[in-house]
Image (tube, helix red, strand yellow):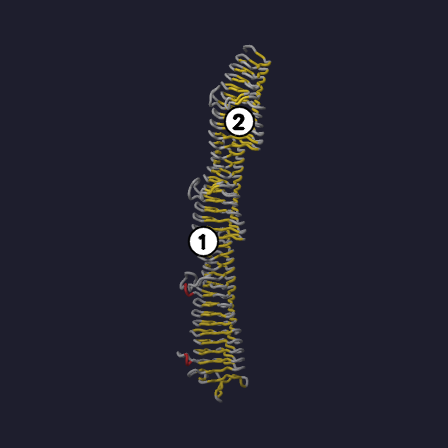
Amino acid sequence: MTTSISGVWSAVLANGKTVYQSNGQVIDGPVNLVGQAPELHVFSGAVVTGLTSPMSAWTAKWASAFIQSGGTIENSTLQSIVAVVSSGGVLANNMLDHTGDKIHSGGTAINNTKFNGGDFYADRSARVNNLTIGQSLSVLSGVVWSGGTVQSGGIVSAVAGSLVQDALVSRGGQVAILSGSTAQNVRTLGTGLNGPGTGIQGSLILSAGGTSVDARIEGGYMSVQGNGAVSRDAYVTSNGWQDVGSNNNGATGGGVASSTTLINGGAQFIKNGLAVDTQVSSGGRQEVAAGGTAQGGTVFAGGQFQIDAGGTGINNAILSGGQGNVWGIAQASNGVASGLTVQNGGSAVALSGGRLSAATLMSGGRAIVSSAGVMADSVLSRGGVARIQSGGTATGITALGNGWWGTEEAAILIGAGGTSLNATLSGGYQSVQGQGAYSENTLITASGWQDVGWNSRDNTYGGGVASGSTLVGGGKQFLSGGTAINTLISSAGTQTVMGTGIASGSLIVSGGSIVVQAGGTSFNAQVASGGVGQVNQGGTAVALNGQTSGMTVQNGGSALALSGGTVTNFTLLSGARGFVSSSGVMASSVLSRGAVARIQSGGTASHLTASGNGWWGTEEAAILVGSGGTSLNATLSGGYQSVQGQGAYSENALVTGNGWQDVGWNSRDNTYGGGVTSGSTLVSGGKQFISGGTAVQTVVSAAGTQTILATGIASNAIVLSGGRTLVTSGGILSGGTIGQGGP
């Protein structure tokens, strides 16, 4: 039987049982507190059970229960009561209906359920276990609260060093972790992001200075916002979501979440905060908004990663089957960022030892690589641009596009001190320009093109080296102010050398072509069968300690063989010039009418053919052998050769088709004296004029004429049928043989 009491009562232990005393009156329990503001003081040893108090609408009439050290209230239903638990007191297994409760330091509250409003306050080292809260505000100050449940409408605020652990936050409930407090193993439930009643999911709110460890966001919500707010090892699933750097009340700024796992619809939104090492698994999503940073995360198969405009990603990895899109900035710095797709307006950055790997740059996407950064195995779609700056390296990059001079083709721009290795320009563009800019083993195809020494996008000029490029399928290389080494030019590939550009060691095979234009120089190029080599006006082809072969030199172009170099299989067209000196060799080449080859000191010409219409034509091809120069086995088919100067020498020249040879005289330069020929053959109108030089063992055959002018010497000439030798005043004929039919 329950007894109703009013006024001030005490519960004490007497004769082994709990009794209730007031002004000498003693009764047994259970009791019901009634009247206006009744009080029950529970003293040591007393255990109050079955205590009730009726609901009151007026705070002034609420009952009060004071639990002293050693006292206990348990298994009771308390309505409109203020329960105050002192150190050593216990409040256990009660229904707290619209109550106001305060657990002082050293007090204990275990397995209580609080609902229908009212406050719950726990102070300092109070112990609160398995508290269930609904439609109430609870403030924990320095408290350890373990194993509780926060139901819809319930709010728990942990301050001043409190620990909330193993708690469950149901849909509509909230746990707020304030400065100096910690949440551990807290679960939040709900229907998830964009689910029914999105705004009333179970919530875990970390404010400035608050900490959470091992939270489980199961369709619920978590925010990490404020300076010093930290979440570690959260697990977000079932469409739950975590805000980092912002909360659902609109506050932004500060907050760090590390090692969060997103799976099965779990999402993380980073705005003005930092997320570190997030793991995005199947169905998970991470989004970095303006001011937010995601660092070091991994996106697995089925996961999604997105950087919005103004957001930043650092060392993010997108594994096979994952998806990563960047509208903001993705950065690799002393780490790896991989698998990202950089959208229009987005940027990827690799610096300070960072590696940007397997990225895709869409149209309008940008990448910047510098300061020991690396961009590797990535694809630039049409309109994407990668800038490789000082100290940066790009390796295995593919640039796509529609080909040469398209304004929106993908572009790899190698600047001063930047390096590109093994790039593929499949209709895309690469510039190698600036001091120390370097490209190696670039494949240029599908009408893609490479500028060396010039950046046509930025219109900058000078410096840059490309080594081992391959041009095929319409691929083009333009050299202007830079140097290309060992370029392979194949089917429909073209190398153009112009304006102080230098090509060294180019190999032009079937279907390929090299064009050397004004100001350009080609060293040691070789044009194989089916290839085309052309030196235009102002261009120069040079053999220097190597071989240049198979090129055609146009009007105003030049071919040089110097210092051990060999020019072979060249064609010099009208107006073209050849220069051979200093151990250089020009061999097996053809001079068309109007072309000139000068064989100077130390130079050798072997098996050259000079063409033309014959004697005294002013535009006939000319081989001019000067002092110290040598010509072997030349053919003058209507063309001209002079052998003039100290040590100038020609051997076994064939002079035919009205071609002519001057010995000791250069009628082109009008210079005179010195020069020796040996074994020349004059036939079919071929002529030899000796004036100031010496001709030895010239064979004068049908319609050939040898004329010995003043100070000229002919020795041991052989004059055959139809041939003539004429000696004019001052000329000397020494020895010789006149055959049948000779004069």
Alpha-carbon span between mark 1 and mark 2: 63 Å
**276 is higher (above) or lower (below) than 524:** below
Q: Nearer the viewer, mark 1 or mark 2?
A: 2
**651 is higher (above) or lower (below) than 238:** above
Which amino acid is tagged 1? Gly
**96 is higher (above) or lower (below) than 485:** below
Residue extending farthest to the bottom is 24
Q: Name the residue under label 1.
A: 328
- Residue 56 appears in which quarter of the rendering? bottom left
Which amino acid is tagged 2? Arg
Viewer-closest of 384 and 511? 384
Quadrant location, the C terminus:
top right
**Please, what secondary structure does the residue beneath circle 2 have?**
strand
Q: Name the side, left or right, on which 235 lies relative to 57.
A: right
> Which numbered tag is attached to residue 598?
2
Q: Where is residue 212 in the image (x, y as percent from the top left)?
A: 51, 65
